[in-house]
Amino acid sequence: MSERLLPLRVVVICATDGFVRALPLNGAAERALELNRHLAEGKHGVEVSMLLYDFNRDSTPTSNWPFPVTYLPHADYFDPKYAQLGRLVRKAKPDVLVISDSALLVRSGRRLADAAGCSLVYEMHAQERVPALSWVGTAEGMHDGVVQREALRLADAVVTFTGEDARYAVDAGAGQVMHLPCGAVPWPAVPGGNPRGPVVVAADLTRASNAQALATLNSCLPDGMPVAVYGRYPAPMRTLLPRLTLHGPVPNLHATLAHGSVGIAAHSEPAGMRAQILAYMAAGLPVIATRQAATGLENTGAVLFSDEPDMADLPQLLAMLRKDPELGRSLGLHGHRRIEQMLSWSRIAERAASAYRSVRPERAGTKASAGARMLYEHPPHWLALPPGPSRALPADRVEAGLNTLADAAVDCARMGASGHLGVHFPPQDSRVDGGRVTFTVPRAVLTVFMQWPRQTAERTTAGLQAAAHCGHITVPRVTGHAGSPGSASWVSLTPVSGTPITDVEDAGAGARILGRVAGYLHCLPQEAWSGVPRLSRTRTSLDTTRRPERLRLLSVLRRSGHHRDGCGLAFVHGNLHAGSVLTGPDAASRPVVTDFSACGVGCPDEDLATLYVHHAGDGHWGEIWSAYQEVCGRAVDLTHVAWHGARYVRWALQDGQPAHLVETVTKALPDLLGFLTDDAVMDHR
């Protein structure tokens, strides 16, 4: 007769703003609820209890939990003596202590486990770097991975969701690594969803990465396509994305998703395993996602992958599903079966129970480094911020909170770069200008990117490395860079000197320099720019209220899409004008180009169009054109340049662009529309 297993006591410490009472608002909260519910309710011999720091200002305590939950006050989270937390852990007498908050684990997790005589498990949700900003004020990452790596070292075992994260944990020095992916409840579902239903998105849109993904989706959706969005969202999003229907959180997400036609995940960065895709699969929906969004779910047979920048091929993928209903049913069926057979919470709970039983306190007595503890031993700014985004707040209070968060993220990136490079960048008033903050010291120039941070940093680095192959211009050398999904990223460069072309007395000479720089870049050999991403501009809905010229612009662009067939392929600067190029210290010096944050591989006429829009009004377009032809000699269709110019104007007129840029492109718009409607002929003068 087999010996009966003693109950395994598991205590979970959860610190999150992801619950409203017991309703989960994001993937981390969903996992905390469902995995532990199935552990407690299943026949696994596991007793589960949770100690909860509920940081959602719109939530209130409730007893409506499927397992015992004890709420802890916010202040106790940063109690250096962890008195109340330690007392509750010792009282529970756990065999296993599970913590997913790396900062909390580093501060007190190992000492709590040692005092209780139990094993310590770190549940790693994703790879962490510099803090990212979210609308509710929580940091979505840690300081340059230092805190997380310390958590990996201190824990007896580490839970990961994806193979990539498991490899990262092993490389960082983790002991026992247990692969326990996220899951879903396999409710009955009709494979293929409702072909006449809306496109659906389920996400916590107060998170920066999710909000960016939704903006990407908004920019590439076909006109008239209904989109239903479910999940917490900041109030300003209603006005920023008016074409989308925002429903907020719903108590029964599965039943709601079943009315949709296809689920979308448009993220440009990997971040663990996304619960939204699992929810789509459980509802039997076909899924369209980027490969980054579907990390850990690549081989489920449930996903159509978008391989174009900013999901530019989404209209074609949606049309494919409309024309082939059987394809949608097949994707939905494969996804639902994968949930039933491998990714149901009941199966994952069974694996978790076995994994928890195998953990031993092999790293008991390990001490956290003083440097790692110091990074997060003080309360962050967001604990003092006003209530969450569902409550109306005066604009000045909201701006003050977001500015505080921006300052904190920039400061963390600055300190991380200083430590990485061995160069001290003194703190300064971190005014965000154009989505970035710049720190300059004699030996280096540090730029911290806040808007599309990782993508922008990667474009900058790749562009500078490509342009370095050109012997006719000077570019700074990259001395370091770092970034991670959804976080503030930084790039460090060697200093360069020069005079902005806008300050050159001979405007014609400056214009000729611009033309030559464009020609030099467009003549770079393909092997020089093989590692550069495709050129991409994020497009959102355009405000046409009382603006007939904008309505005409959109109409002309819809009728002139055939010009896309005439695009070539080359290295493109993406933002070339007098403000982005410096002259050297003397007439014989090479021009200096420092900013490649908008570069990419695309049609070279993009740069010519940008130059025309910025300089046609000053009378020097002809000199730019002549200098370009002297260097490049490429055959150019000027009507095609005008088409790219109109697309650039459409991008520049979006909300949030600098006033001087809007003024410049507005002046150029009438001529561009004339060129595209045969009212005028564009030439090189």
Image (cartoon, rainbow, N blue to C red):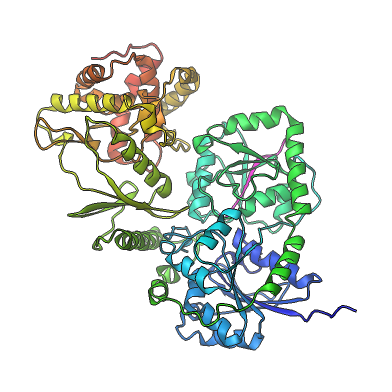
- The percent position of residue 315, horizontal first and vertical second, equals 59, 31
Above or below, 489 against 305 in this view is: below
- The extreme right residue here reads 1
Q: Quadrant of residue 321?
A: top right
Q: The magenta stretch spans which residues?
A: 194-204
- The percent position of residue 366, horizontal first and vertical second, equals 50, 79
Q: Considering the image in quadrants, where does the N terminus appear?
A: bottom right
Task: Confirm whether residue 390 shows in the render.
Answer: no
Q: Total number of numbered labels?
A: 0
Frontmost residue, 445 versus 207: 445
Q: Is residue 342 magenta?
A: no
Q: Specify whether 346 is left or right of 210.
A: right
Task: Confirm whether residue 418 shows in the render.
Answer: yes
| Secondary structure mainly formed by the magenta segment | loop
Residue at 45% from the left image edge and 18% from the top image edge: 563
Residue at 41% from the left image edge and 31% from the top image edge: 601
- The percent position of residue 569, horizontal first and vertical second, equals 41, 24
Above or below, 602 against 623 in this view is: below
